[in-house]
Amino acid sequence: MAGNEITSAEYIKHHLTNLTFGNHPDHGWMLAHTAEEAKEMGFWAIHVDTLFWSLSLASLFAFYFYKAAKKASAGVPSGLQNFVEMIVEFVDESVRGSFSAKNDLVAPLALTIFAWVFLMNLMDLVPVDLIPWISSALGIHYMKVVPSTDPNVTFAMAFGVFFLIIFYSIKMKGVGGFVGELTGMPFQTNNLLLKPFTTVINLILEGVNLLAKPISLSLRLFGNMYAGEMIFILISLMYGAGWVMGIFGGALQLVWAIFHILVITLQAFIFMTLTIVYLDMAHAEHH
Amino acid sequence: MNINLTLIAQLVSFAVFVWFTMKFVWPPLVKAMDERKAKIADGLAAAERGQHEQELARERAKEYLQEAKQQAAEITAKAEKQAALIVEEAKTKAQEEGARQLAAAQAEIEQEVNRAREELRSRVAELAVAGAEKILRREIDADAHKDIVEAVAKQI
């Protein structure tokens, strides 16, 4: 479906550009017309498509789960309630399995992460050109429909989790305990001369350990989804290269989509499980 | 691929959705599920209790039946004994009555015999007198020999 006038590189670039609204240094507040303009806007810009899709999907989740929660009773559950309860049960079991402390926030947090990440990843299965094609017919030039291929989304979630890790670490162990954890391990000494050295080394090691958590969380999800999306884009490029390649591309897309169902669910599950584990470590006295 | 304000917006909305889930979605669902779990456990326990009770009732019914059978047997035995007793009594009574009546009949017969003998005696006396009279009429005067005749009659 790549137009005849544009090259493959342009096609890919087009697909990877967000619909950006921001403050351009030359033109003021506006929708970016090109990827370069979007880049020039710097930090003061918003990815409208990312926000729209992610908030829509989260609202979808919130709406259906709220609907089920409002009607929830101890009687025989109906279809929607059954479905929702199945997911809740699944998340609850994961939390019980990995989280040993008592905290009412963790399970709802895990449910939100799982459902939201799953829904955002699910957009990957929509044919890559479908929604951009519709939106361009409506006059919107750029449209990136998979929010989890936008690092803003994955980093936002990971930073949220990171913030909670630090919050609960300090809440459970106190500032001293948290700092002690960062500096007192893994090298331990009672020698006052060696103490400064071990402290610095420990701080570096534990600091990397701590910072690796949000970065690995966000980059893992982003990387997987971005790569998956990229492959879908590359496959769809084959449709423009003759009917033999087209048919081959169709088969390839089907296979990749089926495989991607696994990736989508797995990534959502990994993000959720790691969040639970990290928060459990934040609550634990030693790790 | 730029990091920009979207990050902050996502962070805020993430917080809002987590808060929403924590406030409105998770607690009612978990509460309902826990309640249902308790309800099912209660139901199962009640079913088990019912089964146990039924077992007990069956046992008790069996016991009652056995007891009733035993009682019936006892009653029958008693009744049979009593019947035998009554028959025995009746027999004894009948025998006694028979004996009594026999005795009475014998007494009457004896009485009758005595009377007949008395009559016979008097008749014999008369007959003897009449005979003697006939004999003596030819030979003697009745008045003259009265004392002799009487003396004879008394000897009979």
Image (spheres, helix red, strand yellow):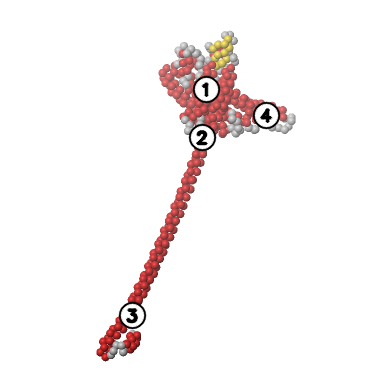
Residue at numbered disc 4: A174
**Side of A173 where A94 appears, left or right:** left
Front residue (pair B27, A213): B27
Q: CA distance from mark 4 to mark 3?
A: 150 Å
Q: CA distance from mark 1 to mark 2?
A: 28 Å
Front residue (pair A48, A36): A48
Of the residues under marks 4 and 1, which one precedes in the sequence? 1
Disc marking residue B118: 3
Chain on which label 3 sits: B
Q: The residue tagged with tag 1: helix, strand or loop?
A: helix
The answer to which image quadrant residue A176 occupies is top right
Residue at numbered disc 2: B36
Q: Residue at x 34, y 78 (%)?
A: B114
Q: Residue at x 52, y 22 (%)?
A: A59
Q: The residue tagged with tag 3: helix, strand or loop?
A: helix
Q: Residue at x 57, y 25 (%)?
A: B19
Amino acid type shown at disc 4: Gly
Disc number lying in front (4 or 3): 3
Extreme-left residue of the structure: B138
Chain on which label 1 sits: A
Chain on which label 2 sits: B
Residue at numbered disc 1: A59
Q: Position of residue A101 (x, y in %)?
A: 61, 33
User: Are the residues at dot 4 and dot 1 in contact (C-beta closer than 8 Å)?
Assistant: no
Disc number lying in front (1 or 3): 3
Q: Residues within 10 Å of mark 1 (few under 14, many from 20)?
A: some
